[in-house]
Image (cartoon, rainbow, N blue to C red):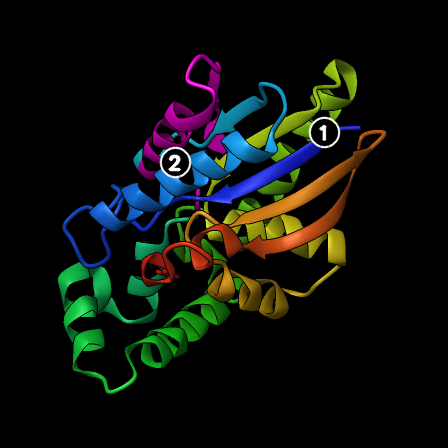
Amino acid sequence: MTTIYLIRHGQASFGAESYDQLSPNGELQAKLLGQYFDNILKEEPYVVAGSMQRHQQTAQIALAECFPEAHLVTNPDWNEFNHQQVFAQYEPRFNEPHLLKADVAKELNPRAYLAKIFEGAIERWTGGEYHHEYEESWPHFKARVETALQNLCDELAQTKPRYAIVFTSGGVISVVAGKILELNPNRTFALNWAIANTSMTTLRLVGNEPQLLSLNEHHFIKAQHPELLTWI
């Protein structure tokens, strides 16, 4: 029976010109993840990652700590939605990442403020009225992720590895969990906001059907270096 670990990438570079690269903190998170895998996995896993830089970096740093010879399969179907466009369609000035970062920095509770922006932007994206305004609409994103999941499950059902690891993003993991738990879009993306960087969401494969075993495990960071915990 295969266990699938869905990994959210390490902390990226929020507010920078390019979000799609790990921060120094994100690199440390990925290293801790790899060390944890070295302790719990008894044989080399099947490994796949999205094609985004933050996915690839997280995978490479983590694997260097546990299975440096593992083959990494790159599949863009595991990529995140374009969060910058989703924010900008909700509030055009947020097309400039540094403006959003500046607004967040002014707030007494930055996380609560960003959560409010995120909720509004996601509601607009998933609501149905504005699908035509996005490069990738919510229905297309959801279908892409669900297809990637089913294709992976079908492949693993044939090859039967003991473990599989997928390096991806919070939105993707939320859609996977939302499909299994039959959640609506609002509840799906409520999960997204809670998923910590380099956390593990674990699935068990029964035949070619995934079952959710755990969501958002990050105790391996909290127990050793709680100051490294991040959600953005």
Q: Position of residue 1 (x, y in %)?
A: 80, 28
Residue located at (59% from left, 34% from top):
40
Instruction: State the SS at label 1.
Output: helix
Q: Which residue is mark 1?
A: 153
Is residue 175 in the magenta section?
no
Give the CA separation, mark 2 to mark 1.
20 Å
In this view of the protein, can residue 70 be seen by the observer? yes
- Quarter of the image for residue 55 reads top left
Q: What span is in magenta?
A: 54-80
Residue located at (67% from left, 65% from top):
184
Residue located at (40% from left, 27% from top):
65
* Quadrant of the snapshot with the C terminus: bottom left
Disc assigned to residue 102:
none
Q: Position of residue 190 (x, y in %)?
A: 55, 69
Residue located at (34% from left, 70% from top):
90
Q: In the picture shown, does residue 107 fall above or below 190?
A: below
Q: Residues within 10 Å of mark 2 (few under 14, many from 20)?
A: many
Q: In the picture shown, does residue 197 fall above or below 191?
A: above
Q: Amino acid at mark 1?
A: Cys
Disc with the residue nearer the chain's start (2 vs 1): 2
Is residue 72 in the magenta section?
yes
Taking 59 as reference, is 42 left or right?
right
Taking 49 as reference, is 23 left or right?
left
Q: In the picture shown, does residue 122 fall above or below 161?
A: below
Q: Amino acid at mark 2?
A: His
Taking 84 as reference, is 209 left or right?
right
Q: Which residue is mark 2?
A: 55
